[in-house]
């Protein structure tokens, strides 16, 4: 009888332990979006602080406090997909340039290979005439804060700096064949005070070159 009680007690402990693990896993998954491992729609966007830009200045998300919408794109120089989207980034920035304090576009590069360091970023931005901030985060922390894993990968933040859209810029890597402009639609919805119809899509691009940790 004592042995049976001990056996039942052991099973109860195992069952409770497994249940706790499942609940923790479920809670963890609820924090992530369908395609993002760490962020969900409605989560606060990560706040970068004093990241160096191609203009020689330090930039923070707080600098954009007056803007209604902030579009954050993780991009780089070395990814063919990111390069293909450079002109589209320029067009998006130009579209809203005539509406001061409404929409800000910020590009962030976290890769640490030579082709993606500030000197190369400055040259690329000069060649393409970027009219938006292009920042570098050598720590790569800001990409991790957003759960970003691709270049390019987009996040649209509302006035409260919560994520209202994340994923791809549009529905086709070939600009001539684009039918839906997810980022632009999300921006327009926020400006109009309407809910974003499509709030998450899978990002398409190269994997961010995260630095491998020792022992990892």
Image (spheres, rainbow, N blue to C red):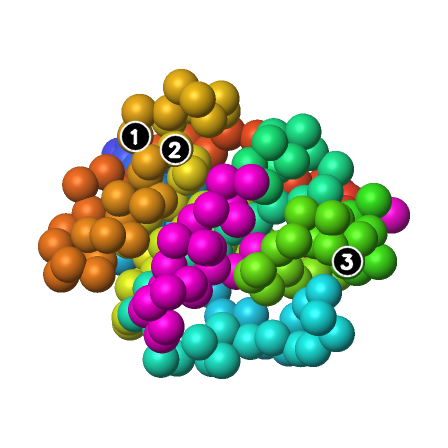
Which residue is outermost to the left? 194
List the residue tagged with mark 3.
Answer: 122
81 and 55: which is toward the camera: 55
Residue 208 colored magenta? no
At x 59% / y 64%, what residue is drawn? 133
Badge 2: residue crowd in 10 Å (few <14, some 14–19, many ≥20): many
Q: Name the residue nearer the viewer: 46 or 93.
A: 93
Neighbour class for label 3 at 10 Å: few (<14), some, many (≥20)? some
Q: What is the spatial separation of the Cα atoms under label 3 and label 2, in whole angstroms?
A: 26 Å
Q: Which mark is residue 52?
A: none
**SS category of the residue bearing label 1:** loop
118 left or right, relative to 11 = right
Could you tell me if the residues under marks 3 and 2 are in contact, i.e. CB atoms within 8 Å? no
Q: Which residue is mark 1?
A: 180
Q: Position of residue 76 (x, y in %)?
A: 68, 45
Q: Residue at x 15, y 59 (%)?
A: 192
Can you see residue 4?
Answer: yes
**Which residues are the magenta region?**
87-114
Quarter of the rendering occupied by the N terminus: top left
Q: Secondary structure beneath disc 2?
A: loop
Instruction: Give the image quarter of residue 77.
Output: top right
The reply to whether dot 1 and dot 2 touch (C-beta < 8 Å) is yes
Residue 27 left/right relative to 125: left
- Distance between mark 1 and mark 2 Cα atoms: 6 Å
Can you identify the residue that label 2 sits on? 170
């Amino acid at each position: 009888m004592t042995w049976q009680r001990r056996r039942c007690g052991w099973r109860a402990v195992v069952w409770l332990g497994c249940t706790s693990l499942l609940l923790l896993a479920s809670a963890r998954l609820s924090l992530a979006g369908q395609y993002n491992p760490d962020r969900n729609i409605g989560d606060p966007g990560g706040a970068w602080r004093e990241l160096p830009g191609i203009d020689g200045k330090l930039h923070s998300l707080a600098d954009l406090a007056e803007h209604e919408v902030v579009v954050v794109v993780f991009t780089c120089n070395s990814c063919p997909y990111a390069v293909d989207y450079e002109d589209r980034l320029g067009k998006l920035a130009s579209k809203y340039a005539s509406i001061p304090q409404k929409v800000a576009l910020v590009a962030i590069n976290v890769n640490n290979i030579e082709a993606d360091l500030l000197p190369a970023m400055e040259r690329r931005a000069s060649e393409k005439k970027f009219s938006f901030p292009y920042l570098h985060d050598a720590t790569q922390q800001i990409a991790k804060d957003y759960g970003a894993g691709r270049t390019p990968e987009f996040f649209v933040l509302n006035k409260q700096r919560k994520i209202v859209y994340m994923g791809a810029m549009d529905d086709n890597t070939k600009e001539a064949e684009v039918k839906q402009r997810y980022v632009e639609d999300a921006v327009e919805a926020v400006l109009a005070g309407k809910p974003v119809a499509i709030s998450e899509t899978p990002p398409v691009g190269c994997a961010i070159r995260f630095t491998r940790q020792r022992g990892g």
